[in-house]
Amino acid sequence: MSGMLGGAVAGAIFKQVWKFASGKEDAPQATSAEYGWGEILVAAAIQGAIFGVVKAAIDRSAAGSIHRATGK
């Protein structure tokens, strides 16, 4: 459940970051011929970083909640 929520949150954050950084509505797809390697790899790196941070925040929050609930 938290994985799906995290994916949705990270996707929404990435979309806004990409729109701000590039001025384009949608990020390039890896298979899209209209974008070069550089833009595709930068988009993938930004997306990966955002997903990693969101996952860590959700995991940390869940661990804190479990610790408070169980004392362990």
Image: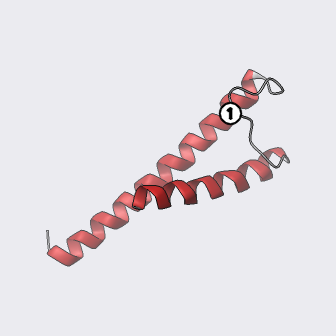
Tag count: 1
Residue 51 coordinates in the image, percent (x, y): 52, 48
Residue under the point 66% across and 29% down: 41
Residue picked out by circle 1 = 42
Q: Is residue 7 left or right of residue 18?
A: left
Residue under the point 72% across and 56% down: 16
Which quadrant would the C terminus be assigned to in this image? bottom left
- The coloring applied to the image is secondary structure
Disc 1 element: helix
Which quadrant would the N terminus be assigned to in this image? bottom left
From what the image shows, is residue 12 above or below residue 42?
below
- The one nearer the camera, 69 or 21, is 69
Image quadrant assignment for residue 12:
bottom right
Image quadrant assignment for residue 47:
top right
From what the image shows, is residue 60 above or below residue 51?
below
Residue 36 coordinates in the image, percent (x, y): 78, 23
Badge 1 density bin: few <14, some 14–19, many ≥20, Cα 10 Å: some
- The one nearer the camera, 5 or 36, is 5
Residue 61 coordinates in the image, percent (x, y): 36, 66
Residue 9 coordinates in the image, percent (x, y): 56, 60
From what the image shows, is residue 55 above or below residue 35?
below
Badge 1 amino acid: Val
From what the image shows, is residue 63 above or below residue 36?
below
Residue under the point 68% across and 33% down: 42
